[in-house]
Amino acid sequence: MKHQTFFNQLSEVIEKKSILNHPFYKCWQAGKLEKSELQEYMKQYYHFENAFPRFMSGIHTNCENAEMRKVMLKDLIGEEGEATNHVDQLITFSRALGLSKDEVINSKANQNTADAIKTFLELAQDKNIKKGLAALATYKEQIRKVAETKEHGLKEYYGIQSDYALQFFRTHAKKNVAWHELLDEMISEKEYPVALGAVNSLCDAWWHYLDGVTTPSMKKRMVC
C-alpha cells in the first residue's frame, strides 16, 4: 500500500471500535443468545444487506475513473447479480434458524437499523468518494473478522452444521482488499482526516445498529 500510514490508522480505529466487543457479539460468541434473538438479528441484518448494493453503486456513480469503475462493478455484480448472491445466502442461513423467506423480507427495520443504513448511504453517495471507499473498506474488514468467529459458535452452540446454511459467513470471511486498493490509489495525505471521519462514522453506526438488537433480557444474561 502506498498509504500504509493511513491504513494503519484505519486499523487502529477498527480495533478500538470493534463490533466484536459489542455486548451482542460477546453474548453470541459465548452461546448465550436465545434463538428468537438470533432470528431478530437476522431480520434486521437482512435490511442492511439488502441495501448494501446501493452503498456500492453510490460510490460507483460518483467515480470518474473508468478503470476503477470496472473494479467496483465486478464486486457489485457479485453482491447482487449472481445466482447465489449475498442476500440469498443470508436468507438460506435464516431458514436454518427457523425463519421463512417471507418472515425475513416482510420484516420491518427498527429505528437503529434504519439509522445505520442512512449513515452508510450518506457516506457512499457523497461526492467525495474517499468517504464512501473508507466506509466500505471499514465495513468489509469488520464483517470479515466477525464472520471468522461466527461459524464456530453457530456449530457449537446452535447446532447449525450445514455447509449450505453457513455459506454466507464463509463468503464474508474471505479477505477482500479491492476497495482498500482503490482507496489507496485515490487518497492523498491531506485527505486522511476526512476519510478517517468516515471510518469513525461507520463504526459508530454499526455499533448503534447492534444496540437495536440487544435486549434488556439479554444484558442480564451477560457475564462477559
Image (cartoon, rainbow, N blue to C red):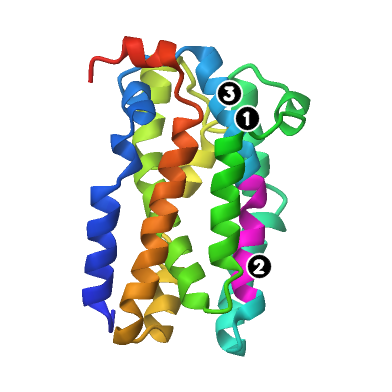
Q: Nearer the viewer, residue 84 or 38?
A: 38
In this rendering, position of residue 97 left or right of residue 221: right
Figure quadrant of the N terminus: bottom left
Is the stretch drawn in magenta largely helix, strand or loop?
helix
Which residue is drawn at the image coordinates 34% and 87% (left, top)? 188
Query: Would you name the residue on which mark 3 appears?
Result: 40
In this rendering, position of residue 24 left or right of residue 86: left
Q: Position of residue 217 (x, y in %)?
A: 42, 10
Amino acid type for the residue under numbered disc 2? Ser
Which residue is drawn at the image coordinates 63% and 30% (left, top)? 43
Label 2, secondary structure: give it.
helix
Q: Is residue 87 above or below residue 27?
A: below
Which residue is drawn at the image coordinates 50% and 27% (left, top)? 213
Q: Residues within 10 Å of mark 2 (few under 14, many from 20)?
A: some
Q: Residues within 10 Å of mark 3 (few under 14, many from 20)?
A: some
Based on the displayed image, in which of its 4 quarters is residue 9 positioned? bottom left
Amino acid type for the residue under numbered disc 1? Lys
Whether residue 78 is visible: no
In this rendering, position of residue 123 left or right of residue 192: right
Q: Nearer the viewer, residue 135 or 190?
A: 190
Amino acid type for the residue under numbered disc 3? Glu
Q: Position of residue 98 (x, y in %)?
A: 63, 16
Q: CA distance from mark 1 to mark 3?
A: 5 Å
What stretch of residues is rendered in magenta?
Answer: 49-60
Query: Would you name the residue on which mark 1 appears?
Result: 43
Query: Would you name the residue on which mark 2 appears?
Result: 57
Asked if residue 57 lies in the magenta stretch, the reply is yes
Q: Position of residue 203 (x, y in %)?
A: 39, 51
Q: CA distance from mark 1 to mark 2?
A: 23 Å
